Each structure stands twice: as C-alpha cells, then as structure tokens.
Amino acid sequence: MGRPVVILCVTPSPAIDRSGRVDRFVPDRVLRPSSLVVLAGGKGVNVARTAHALGALVVTTGFAGGHAGRWLVESLAAEGLNPRFVETGPETRTTYVLADDRGRTLLVYEPAPALAAADRRRLVELLASELVPAADLVAIAGSLPDGLGRSAAAELVRHCELAGRPCLVDLSGPDLRSALEARPSVVKISLEEAIGGRFAARGPSAASDAVQALVAGGAGRAIVTDGPRGAVGHDGERIWEVTVPRVEAVSPVGSGDAFSAGVAIGLAAGRPFEEALAMGAAAGTANTRTLGAGRIRVEDYEAALAAVRVRDRHPSPTGGRRGPA
C-alpha cells in the first residue's frame, strides 16, 4: 500500500462549534439538549476531520485568537489534525447548532472578527514556505475575515498553483469571485451558493448550468452539491450527475464539507474525477448520520459508497460510469 495522502486544510474563519440535540423546537421555551457536542469547527476544519477519519494525513491552518483560539488549537492537536494556525488578537468566534427529532436544524453563526493586512501576510508566508509544498492537495474552505483585502482568496490559490499543488476551493460571494481569478483546480459549492452568486438561475437545470459557468469562469473542475438530491460535477468535458442513497439523517450540518474531504482524498490519490465525486458523495451522506460536523463512521461511509451512483450526463456507447464500491 502507498503512503496516505496529505491534505492541507485552510480555515480562514474557524469557530468553536456547539451542537445540541432536542426533541423539538418550541418558540419562547427553554430548550435543554439531550446531547451536546463541542468541537473545533469551521468549514476547513470539518474537511480535515472527515479526511482524517477516512485515513488521510491532514494539516490545519488559518487564524485563531484569544482564549477561544487557544482552545481550538489545543482541541485540533488532540484530534490529530496537526494545527499550524496564525495567532491573532481578536477572539475566535463560536457557532451554535440545534437539531431536533423531526430533522430540522437551527443555526446561529457569530461573524468572524475583522483582521489586518499583517495577519494575511503571516498566513501567506507560512503557506508558501512550509505548508503548501508538503501537501498533496490544499483545501480552502469558509469565508475570509474582513480586513484581509479583496484579493486575499486569489493570493491563497496562486501560492498553491506556484507550488504545483492542486487547490480545492469552497468559498462564496466575493471570495469565490476572487479565487476564480487565480484559476483553482476545483471549486465545490452548494446549489444555494451557486444561485446566490448568480452562476445559475433557479430551475431544474440550475446545478448543471452552475458547474459550466464556474468552469467557464476559471475553475479547472466544478462541483455543485444539493443535499439529499445529490450533486453535479463538470471536468471541462463531461457533466457528471451524482445520486446519493436515502438515509435516516441525524444532522446535515457539515455534509458539504465532508463531500469536499472525499473529493480531496480521491483527487490527491490520483483517482478519476467521477470516482472522487462518488467518494465525496459517500462522505457527505455518512456525515448526516452523526451529530457534529465531520465525525463520520467508516462503516457509514462504506455503506454509502456502495450505493452512490455517478452517471455521465452525455454517456458513451458503453453507458455511464460509477464510483468504486
């Protein structure tokens, strides 16, 4: 067997994630969770936790500040997620997730604190000098804090490309537009983000339209996820439709990040794009089975992978292809 792939996960806006489960939401009543999970979080951290659970070696980086930031870094180290964060002055934020027995979720996300241009320079120096060259693939996920400048996302992507490392981007809004200027290897966003970013109009072909627009806009490959309805991917030549199995979900929070982790592992290992899509879909599905983003069970992943289907929307004479079982 070859060595595990190394995934560098960049989380510009990490958080302490507090996830609780209640019987049902009742307005104007005290809600007392029957279970509570407190984890280091943020989109890139969720990618790292999932990738680690699936056997990859991961390194995490981004910005962390104050008592909360120190707790976050210590927690990541205890999980084996190898934190190399830039320490900042402002306190790291907290996010709150409640899930009930009816499958509903309530999300409260504190805004990330504004940072300074000097913080951006320190992160870029760390990435360029040490972290990116040691990785097989870099995943940049989550919003960028205010104060870093409009070109910050593009600069992060360019350092990956300069080092010859593929870069998977999961950003939205102006950050995504900035990243596209640097032509990232892969862009993965949700359908709602694609519509909100005007990469497609709402309708039955929205996901397909969006992946084509993203590739035309600078992405080497593009993926648009749509929760239990699956995903669509585009590699510049073919459009792939991903169908996921129906499962009894505990919480969907972090499933898009888990999808990114599966794709990242597949591409870093040199798998074909359609196989990486299947791995991503299986990881995203497995994530819905537990409370707390990225805390997937390998048996849930393997069961989902056996049931995922990836179909060429423009099939060859031999028919569509599917991911590994």
Image (spheres, grey):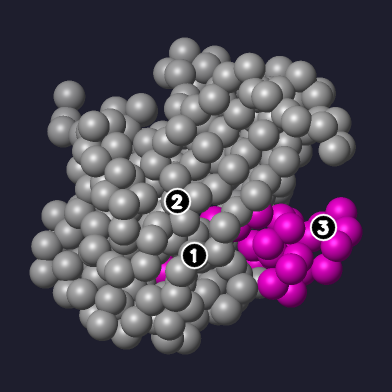
In x, y percent, where is residue 125?
Answer: 17, 74
Q: Foreground mark, 3 or 1?
A: 1
Q: Which residue is mark 1?
A: 112
Magenta residues span 184-212
Q: Which residue is mark 2?
A: 15
Q: In the rendered structure, which amino acid carries the disc numbered 3? A: Ser
**Magenta stretch containing residue 167, yes or no?**
no
Q: In the rendered structure, which amino acid carries the disc numbered 2? A: Ala
Image height of 151 relative to 111, above or below: below
Earlier in the chain: of badge 2 and badge 1, it is 2
Image height of 269 relative to 165, above or below: above
Q: Are marks 2 and 3 in contact (CB under 8 Å)?
A: no
Residue visible at 71% across and 55% down? 191
In x, y percent, where is residue 215?
Answer: 57, 70
Front-most of residues 107 and 317: 107
Front-most of residues 71 and 229: 71
- Res 2 quadrant in image: top left
Please give the count of numbered marks on the rendered protein. 3
Q: Which residue is mark 3?
A: 205
